[in-house]
Amino acid sequence: MHARHVVLACALLAVAACANTANKPAPAAPPAPAAARDDSLYRALGAQAGIEKVVDAALVEIHNDPHIDLFFANTDMPDLRRLLVEQFCAATGGPCEYTGRSMEEAHGGLNLTDEDFDRFVADLVRAFDKAAVPKDLQQQLLALFGPMRPQIVGQ
Ligand code: HEM
């Protein structure tokens, strides 16, 4: 091959390589580094041990509320505890993955009303008070779970 042809071939290859790069989809964004996750609420609640304490307090209040406790008559409570800990941990920015069902699925067939939901929230607030969760953190928690009402009520 003449030198001129080699140069031409190289130039063509370079164009092809360039075109190829241009057609490639943008590379996937790298996973967010752990530091980018806002885990301030998780940490303020006392991380894993704090979350477990809050969930345990909630389960006590639920159990002590006959109207709400009835809904859990057939529920595997250790499993529910595990799922609530995962959910609270994940929702507050902790290093957990929620592995339970969607809120629609989990509450499907229960026909929960707004009154049930409000009463459940009141039980939660009593539990947060007993677990000495500061009010500003309680508000942050309720702001995470309040919007789930439409997925839970009337399913
Ligand atoms: C923001 C409010 C609520 C949250 C975050 C929540 C969260 C959860 C979670 C994570 C589960 C487990 C999901 C699974 O089994 O895969 C669950 C199940 C359940 N929830 Fe809720 N829940 C809420 C409100 C309520 C209310 C108001 C009631 C009743 C008054 C209720 C009754 C139940 C019952 C009975 C189950 C167990 C269902 C079963 O055993 O199959 N939940 N909930």
Image (tube, rainbow, N blue to C red):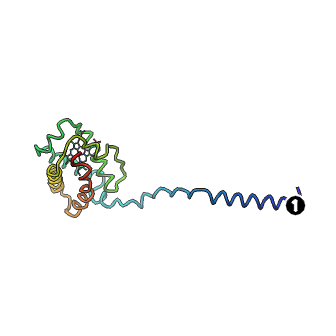
Residue under the point 16% across and 57% down: 129
Local crowd at mark 1 within 10 Å, few (<14), some, or many (≥20)?
few
Instruction: Give the left or right position of residue 31, taking residue 118 as reference.
Output: right
- Determine which quarter of the picture holds residue 134: bottom left
- The amino acid marked with disc number 1 is Ala
Find the residue positioned furthest to the front.
154
Which residue is the site of mark 1?
Answer: 3
Instruction: Give the left or right position of residue 86, taking residue 132 as reference.
Output: right
Instruction: Give the left or right position of residue 90, taking residue 11 as reference.
Output: left
Find the residue positioned furthest to the top.
74
Mark 1 lies on a secondary structure that is helix
On screen, residue 138 above or below 112: below
Q: Position of residue 84 (x, y in %)?
A: 27, 47
Ligand 1 location (quadrant): top left
Say which quadrant the C terminus sits in: top left
- Determine which quarter of the picture holds residue 126: bottom left
Residue under the point 25% across and 55% down: 145
Say which quadrant the N terminus sits in: bottom right
Residue under the point 30% across and 60% down: 41
Find the residue positioned furthest to the right.
2
Find the residue positioned furthest to the bottom.
136
Q: Position of residue 61 (x, y in %)?
A: 14, 48
Instruction: Give the left or right position of residue 71, taking residue 33 as reference.
Output: left
Viewer-nearest residue: 101 or 137: 101
Q: Position of residue 37 (x, y in %)?
A: 39, 59
Residue under the point 14% across and 51% down: 115
Queried on whether the Cβ of the residue with tag 1 lies below 8 angstroms from ligand 1, the answer reads no
